[in-house]
């Protein structure tokens, strides 16, 4: 708490009716304190929009601000394109050659089969003529060689067609598959980085302060908004040295304040083990120069009290 607030609370406590009067019930004095959540961006950039103002009440997940995201949108588009390319490559490796390439091989096979049919007919005719001693045996041998050559070409074309229909080797397919995985991860990272340019409230509460205006540059980790969650309100008060030994963590207390219609029930959550002199924030004629121990109490139910408000604390019997 800053110096001005501290002295204001000190003066308010000093002027509090009954603060120094003699009463039978022991009271301790303190003030309300809040644990603020400082919301910052995970990346640096220009603040594009700020959708809340100081004093607003927000709910968990409500948008707070956004940073310029032009670069992130371009990066995501590029990563998506790379992923599409990797998927196409994997599909190509998994399905063999393209239909156009297969048709070329089929055409060569049909041509080879036609030549084989012609060579076979020529050989059969030469064989009949050789049996009648009409042609020389050398002509029959030549036709036999042509038939064997045509048959070999047909078998070669059929083998080429079979291989063309097969997918790529296992190692090539696995490499293409890993390329797809890496491209997908890169696209996911780019998508997350784009989403991180939009920052939402991590919890419900009220906006205590905003630190930048749209158009200003925000550094990584620098708070843009501070939020005080309702459940992060606590009461700080000081126990005098004589009473310290009798008070335990977990004890119930009643919190009072100026114009409070009813006391607020709270439970002591912490007591310092180090004595200190009464701080100026709760200084009064009654408590001057006394050694005290700082204590904290948490409200049992959410409270509307705000940081800086002076309080008095009474132990429950």
Image (cartoon, grey):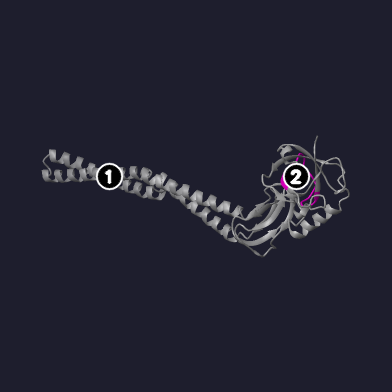
Q: Residue at x 70, y 50 (%)?
A: 276
Please name the residue that numbered disc 1 is placed on: 156
Mark 2: secondary structure: strand
* Front residue of 113 and 265: 265
Give the class, few, some or many, for how many residues have Cα within 10 Å of label 2's Cα (few <14, many ≥20): many
Please name the residue that numbered disc 2 is placed on: 239
Viewer-side label of 2, 1: 2
**Residue 127 percent across, percent down from the top left:** 16, 40
Q: Which residues are magenta?
A: 292-310
State the quadrant of the C terminus.
top right
**Residue 150 percent across, percent down from the top left:** 24, 45
Residue 152 forms part of the magenta stretch: no
- Residue 285 visible in the current orientation: yes
Q: Name the quadrant containing residue 198.
A: bottom right
Q: CA distance from mark 2 to mark 1?
A: 100 Å
* Left or right of residue 137, residue 252 in this image: right
Outermost residue to the top: 317
- Residue 58 visible in the current orientation: no
* Left or right of residue 283, residue 94 in this image: left
State the quadrant of the N terminus.
bottom right
Give the class, few, some or many, for how many residues have Cα within 10 Å of label 1's Cα (few <14, many ≥20): some
* Front residue of 150 and 67: 67
Q: Residue at x 30, y 43 (%)?
A: 159
**Residue 31 percent across, percent down from the top left:** 77, 49
Mark 1: secondary structure: helix
Identify whether 280 is placed above or below 243. below
* Left or right of residue 164, residue 70 in this image: right
**Residue 130 percent across, percent down from the top left:** 13, 40
């Amino acid at each position: 708490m800053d110096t001005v607030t501290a002295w204001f609370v000190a003066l308010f406590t000093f002027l509090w009716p009954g603060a120094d009067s003699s009463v039978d019930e022991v009271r301790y004095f303190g003030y309300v304190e809040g644990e603020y959540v400082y919301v910052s961006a995970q990346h640096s950039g220009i603040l594009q929009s700020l959708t809340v103002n100081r004093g607003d009440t927000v709910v968990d997940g409500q948008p707070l601000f956004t940073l310029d995201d032009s670069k992130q949108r371009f990066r995501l588009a590029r990563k998506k394109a790379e992923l599409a390319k990797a998927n196409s490559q994997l599909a190509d490796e998994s399905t063999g050659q393209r239909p156009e390439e297969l048709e070329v091989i089929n055409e060569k096979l049909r041509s080879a089969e036609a030549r084989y049919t012609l060579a076979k007919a020529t050989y059969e005719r030469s064989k009949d003529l050789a049996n009648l001693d009409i042609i020389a045996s050398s002509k029959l041998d030549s036709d036999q060689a042509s038939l064997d050559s045509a048959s070999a070409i047909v078998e070669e074309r059929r083998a080429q067609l079979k291989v063309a229909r097969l997918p790529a080797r296992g190692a090539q397919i696995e490499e293409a598959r890993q390329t797809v995985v890496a491209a997908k991860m890169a696209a996911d990272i780019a998508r997350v980085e784009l989403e991180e340019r939009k920052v939402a409230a991590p919890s419900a509460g009220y906006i205590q302060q905003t630190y930048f205006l749209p158009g200003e540059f925000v550094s990584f980790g620098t708070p843009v908004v501070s939020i005080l969650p309702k459940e992060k309100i606590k009461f700080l008060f000081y126990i005098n040295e004589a009473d310290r030994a009798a008070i335990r963590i977990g004890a119930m207390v009643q919190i009072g304040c100026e114009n409070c219609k009813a006391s607020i029930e709270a439970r002591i959550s912490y007591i310092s083990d180090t004595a200190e002199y009464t701080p100026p924030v709760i200084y009064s004629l009654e408590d001057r120069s006394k050694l005290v121990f700082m204590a904290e109490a948490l409200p049992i139910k959410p409270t509307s009290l705000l940081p800086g408000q002076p309080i008095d604390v009474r132990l429950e019997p």
